[in-house]
Every structure is written in C-alpha cells, then in structure tokens.
Amino acid sequence: MEIYKDILKLREDFFKDFDLDKIKNLLDDTKFEKLPIIDNISDEKISEIIKIIEPKNIILKLMEKYDLKLDENFSDFEEKIVKILDGEEIDIDEEKLNTYEIIFRVYGVPFTAIWKAIKDKIDLSKFDENFCPICGGSFDYAYIDEEGKKFLVCDLCRYPWRYTRVKCPICENEDQNKLSYLQFEGDYEFVRIYQCENCSESHKVLLVDKIKKYPSVELANIETIPLEFAIDEK
Ligand SMILES: [Zn+2]
Ligand SMILES: [Zn+2]
C-alpha cells in the first residue's frame, strides 16, 4: 500500500509545478474525433510527451526507495510495458512484479498530462462505456460525487468518467435486481462493495460526501484496498 501512496504523492507533486501549456501547445492542432482520445495522437507526439514528463525519473526514485532491482536494461522493461499497454500478454517474472507494477502505474502519468491539458476541449458527456475514454484502460474503482453522479476512475491515467449509476461496470448489466451492495459502517461508512449476480464480480464504490478521514478520493481508494480483499475472501 505504501508504494501506491508514494506513486499518488509523486503524481500529485509532479503536477503541482508542471506547466500544462507544454502539452497543450503540442496538441494544439490535434483533432479529437475518435475514442479513446489517445488514438487521435500520433506516436511521435506521444513519445514527445513521454520525453517531457520523463516517467523514468519517477520510476528510478521509487525503485531506489523500495530497493527494487533490474537485471535487464531499462529499455527492455520499457518495451515490455508498451506491449502491456497495447493489450499484449507477456510473461512476467514473479519476483519483478512490484517493479512492473510501479513502471506500469507511473507510465500512466503522461496520459494524465494529456487529459489535464485537453479536458476543456473534449466533450465526453455522452460517453457511458466501461473503458477509459482517454487511454482505453480499465477502471480501478468507482465513486459517487456530492450530486449523486457516479464516476469510474481509470486504473492507468486516473481519469474519472461519468457512468450510469445502476449498471455493472464489468459486464454492463443494468438489471437492478441483479445488483446489490454491502455498505461498511463506522470509519468506513463511505465504502460500498457492489456485487453483480450476472457476472459474479464485485467493485468498490466510494461515497464522496461521506469521506471525511482522507483529503482526496484517490487516497481514500488506496486506504480501502484491504476492504476489497476482505470481501473477495468471503
Ligand atoms: Zn485512462
Ligand atoms: Zn456484472
């Protein structure tokens, strides 16, 4: 859990003094006609954005802190991550799972920069799919905001997109008789675990107006990961 918190902090710190105009200018003449959004951006521009963000620096900092080592060169790892991002299945050495996890998560940062830079230029109000409209990634968790609207948060780029409230984001079942939830009490009264009878999967939904313990939804998500496992084991 510590690693997730560090990645969140590094991500937040990074954007605190990052000049988004660098990305805005680069994407100035890009038309956003198809989804996910990154499919409109040329590979050259994506590599330029990665060069500007330099996720490698963040990764190396984390690897040092957690004493994670690479015995291959870094570019081999990068290549594998690109394959994972392209949806390819690759063999990963169990011992290096943590390193991959870090690299994978940090590689979402350039995509985060993209949506932060162009969010006023795109209209996703009619989007209601279970994949991220920015990077095509899957959702990590859901939350319901103060107005009662439900959002899914991307596992990779952290973009939150609007989603139908009574609908399973895994199998897209909308039959409310097949969706039920377990609500935690006390300190964790902001956590609901929805269970879908159609696909037998569950997903976590955080109630933003009840989160008092944590300064952000993202941190509340990390702090409640163990609750998801508690449900899985039942
Ligand atoms: Zn995404
Ligand atoms: Zn389902």
Image (cartoon, rainbow, N blue to C red):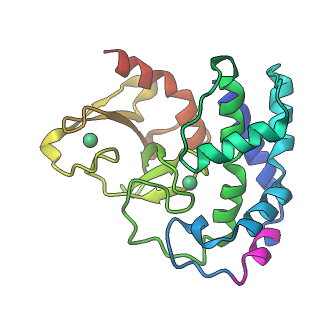
Quadrant holding the C terminus: top left
Q: Nearer the viewer, residue 66 or 80?
A: 80
State the predominant SS element of the stretch in magenta. helix
| Image x and y of residue 92, in percent | 63, 27
The residue located at (80%, 47%) in the rendering is 55
Q: Nearer the viewer, residue 183 or 123?
A: 123
Q: Is residue 213 visible?
A: no
The residue located at (80%, 49%) in the rendering is 14
Q: Is residue 102 visible?
A: yes
Q: Is residue 5 above or below residue 145?
A: above
Q: Which residue occupies the extreme left position in the image?
A: 177
Residue 10 image-quadrant placement: top right
| Image x and y of residue 188, in percent | 44, 27
Residue 70 image-quadrant placement: top right
Q: Is residue 47 above or below residue 30?
A: above
| Image x and y of residue 86, in percent | 58, 51
* Horizontal side of residue 173 vs 74, given as left or right: left
The residue located at (63%, 24%) in the rendering is 1
* Horizontal side of residue 147 vs 234, given as left or right: right
* Residue 71 lies within the magenta run: no
Q: Quadrant for ligand 2?
A: top left
- Magenta stretch in the rendered image: 22-29
| Image x and y of residue 137, in percent | 52, 51
The residue located at (60%, 43%) in the rendering is 84
Q: How many marks?
A: 0
